[in-house]
């Protein structure tokens, strides 16, 4: 038994070392793709009040990201303090948005929650709940915009207005089905192909929806603050939602190139390409890079705490 535990400790050390190397390589690669002089030029175009408002909206968005994990705490029934949960959630999202969800959002959660003493099963429920929360609000908002034909895909996408409308209705039906399933199951444990899971209560499902919708609304407001004049909120919102799913499909960290392509395609008739690209550079600086710097510091603090008092 002692030899087995020793081997497992060595395996965990090696796995963590590999994890750190992968995260480090991804961070370096991401840093090399950033055109830092252009970021500085883009930010210099804005006044202090605009940048302050932008950072307030960034803070609000990351607080809502933290709320995903706080709601997941109630779903998974763990008892970690609120401050610890928020620190872990912030760090995970800061890394996840920049270097990819698998290594960042999922990998860091497993690492940090395990240090805090949670079992793998509990962490898996937190991860699943948080992912579901994020996309639940997306489905509702994108469904409303597609179904009402407020989003008109570019012609070369091959997605007609009718098809997009039906896609929107399908998204809304998925949200309704999820809420109905939460109501009908009443917290019962469900079994599917040898796996066991439990849907949240109807009240918790509604909380998921409210938090997620609020976050998407705030992120769109951040983009609108940085956008050139003459571009409406609905147009920005639609471009954000389309770019989010495009980035998720391509698995490109931070959606580099994807975000720009979608916004140029959908909003190119409302503003010049240089103006839109400058806006997106400023958005990346505020929403991705600044939280990443804070996330690195927060991760260092959490790791030092774990070494002093290992779970």
Image (cartoon, rainbow, N blue to C red):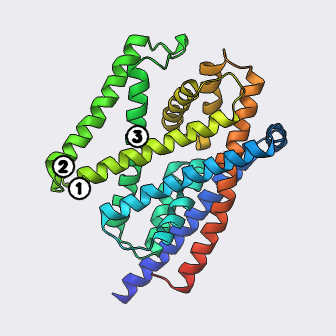
* Residue 67, quarter of the rendered image: bottom left
Q: Secondary structure at mark 3?
A: helix
Picture residue at 49% right of the left edge, 59% below the top: 107
Comes first in the chain, label 1 or label 3: 3
Residue 277 located left or right of residue 69: right
Q: Are marks 1 and 2 in contact (CB under 8 Å)?
A: yes
Picture residue at 42% right of the left edge, 48% below the top: 211
- Marks 1 and 3, how far apart in space? 21 Å
Comes first in the chain, label 3 or label 2: 3
Q: Nearer the viewer, mark 1 or mark 3?
A: 3
Question: What residue did someone put label 2 on?
Answer: 192
Question: What residue did someone put label 1 on?
Answer: 197
Q: Is residue 132 visible?
A: no
- Marks 1 and 2, how far apart in space? 8 Å
Q: Quadrant of the N terminus?
A: bottom left
Q: Quadrant of the C terminus?
A: bottom left
């Amino acid at each position: 038994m002692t030899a087995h535990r020793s081997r497992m400790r060595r395996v965990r050390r090696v796995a963590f070392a590999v994890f750190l190397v992968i995260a480090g390589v991804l961070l370096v690669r991401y840093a090399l793709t950033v055109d830092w002089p252009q970021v500085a030029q883009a930010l210099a175009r804005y006044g202090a009040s605009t940048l302050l408002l932008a950072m307030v909206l960034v803070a609000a968005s990351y607080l809502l990201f933290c709320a995903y994990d706080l709601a997941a705490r109630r779903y998974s029934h763990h008892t970690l303090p609120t401050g610890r949960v928020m620190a872990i959630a912030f760090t995970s999202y800061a890394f996840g948005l920049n270097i990819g969800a698998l290594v960042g959002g999922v990998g860091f959660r497993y690492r940090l929650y395990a240090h805090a003493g949670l079992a793998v099963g509990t962490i898996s429920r937190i991860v699943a709940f948080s992912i579901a929360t994020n996309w639940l609000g997306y489905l509702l908002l994108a469904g409303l915009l597609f179904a009402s034909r407020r989003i008109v895909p570019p012609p070369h996408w091959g997605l007609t207005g009718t098809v997009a409308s039906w896609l929107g209705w399908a998204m809304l039906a998925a949200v309704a089905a999820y809420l109905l399933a939460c109501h009908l199951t009443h917290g019962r444990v469900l079994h599917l192909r040898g796996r066991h899971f439990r849907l949240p209560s109807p009240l918790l499902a509604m909380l998921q929806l409210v938090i997620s919708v609020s976050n998407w609304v705030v992120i769109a407001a951040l983009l609108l603050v940085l956008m050139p004049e003459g571009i409406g909120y609905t147009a920005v919102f639609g471009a954000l939602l389309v770019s989010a799913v495009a980035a998720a499909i391509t698995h490109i960290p931070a959606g580099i190139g994807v975000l720009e392509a979608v916004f140029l395609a959908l909003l190119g008739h409302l503003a010049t390409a240089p103006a839109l690209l400058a806006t997106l550079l400023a958005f990346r600086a505020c929403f991705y890079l600044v939280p990443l710097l804070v996330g690195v510091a927060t991760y260092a603090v959490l790791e030092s705490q774990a070494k002093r008092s290992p779970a």
